[in-house]
Image: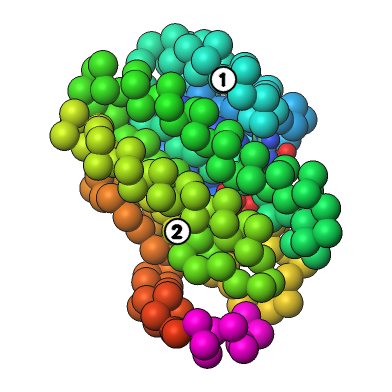
Amino acid sequence: MSTAIQTSTPKKILVLGATSGIAEATCRLWAAEGAALFLVARNEEKLAAVAADLKVRGASYIGTAVADLDDTDQHPALLAHAINSLAGMDIAYLAHGILGDQTAAEQDFATAAQIIHTNFVSPVSLLTWLANYCVQRKSGVLAVISSVAGDRGRKSNYLYGSSKAGLTAFLAGLRNRIDREGVTVLTIKPGPIKTAMTATMKGAEKFADVNQTAKTIAGAIAAKKDNLYVPFQWQPIMFVIRNIPDRIFKKLNL
Ligand SMILES: NC(=O)c1ccc[n+]([C@@H]2O[C@H](COP(=O)([O-])OP(=O)(O)OC[C@H]3O[C@@H](n4cnc5c(N)ncnc54)[C@H](OP(=O)(O)O)[C@@H]3O)[C@@H](O)[C@H]2O)c1
């Protein structure tokens, strides 16, 4: 019987929003490769269950921190602790987000502001610190989950969509600034995926499989891509949607 010899050092990966269905599925792939993972989530019980599962699946190291990522004041200390604990960082994976209640947000600014804070302001705070860390070291991958919903505002979810549009634009500018410093910025735009976030939506049973999605994301991170639509057919679909003239688009029920 031959013994497998590990030739490369394990990847050091920081995961923000580690209890997300998409993040957890991606971490399972990394754990099987023996990666070192630092997991941040706000629900202590769920986080402990995810961490235990990833350890069993082969992660070489698991660190955890419980944090509400809306609390931007905590970010610098949290990130410094995570990277210290990993003794470095090759990849940061930002997965936290909320769909929010579009109908409520149309009437109530506090609801709208919450969606924008969690999906846009919080990642901007985290990425400002992480980008500067990576630039100093001239390496690293910042992989961030935005959404196809950010490609064009629609009446059914334009608060969520605009928070993701802001995030996508921020990432495009950040990439333009730091790619030349040796730092990769990957914008991930999933279409509808079967996770807790979409479980109660109409037609959810037909949404894309989370494990397949995770495989595609892990591949794009390893290949240091700039942008990813997942599943891939959302790239041409969103091209068409972006190009529908407003005189027609405003009459559609999307
Ligand atoms: N599923 C889709 O169809 C789809 C499509 C496009 C984009 N996305 C994006 O993909 C990412 C992952 O979503 P998912 O589909 O995996 O859904 P999910 O399972 O509901 O994951 C969302 C995660 O975000 C966490 N979170 C929300 N607010 C947080 C906060 N303030 N602090 C810390 N954690 C917070 C949630 O924690 P709790 O469990 O504690 O609530 C949960 O773990 C999100 O950014 C989402 O917008 C999803």
Q: Is residue 58 above or below residue 185?
A: above
Q: Which residue is mark 2?
A: 189
The image quadrant where one finds the N terminus is top left
| Residue at the spot 45% in from the left edge and 59% down from the top edge | 189
- Asked whether residue 84 is drawn in magenta, I would say no
Q: Is residue 41 above or below residue 162?
A: above
The quarter of the picture where residue 63 lies is top right
Using the image as rendered, state which of residue 170 and residue 186 is in the foreground: 170
Disc 1/disc 2 C-alpha distance (Å): 24 Å
Q: Which residue is mark 1?
A: 75
Left or right of 150? Residue 240 is: left
Amino acid type at mark 2: Lys
Using the image as rendered, state which of residue 156 and residue 213 is in the foreground: 156
Left or right of 38? Residue 252 is: right
Amino acid type at mark 1: His
Residue 77 in sight = yes
In magenta, the rendered stretch is 246-254
- In the rendered image, residue 10, in percent from the top left (x then y), is placed at 32, 26
Count of marks placed on residues: 2
The image quadrant where one finds the C terminus is bottom right
The quarter of the picture where residue 100 lies is bottom right
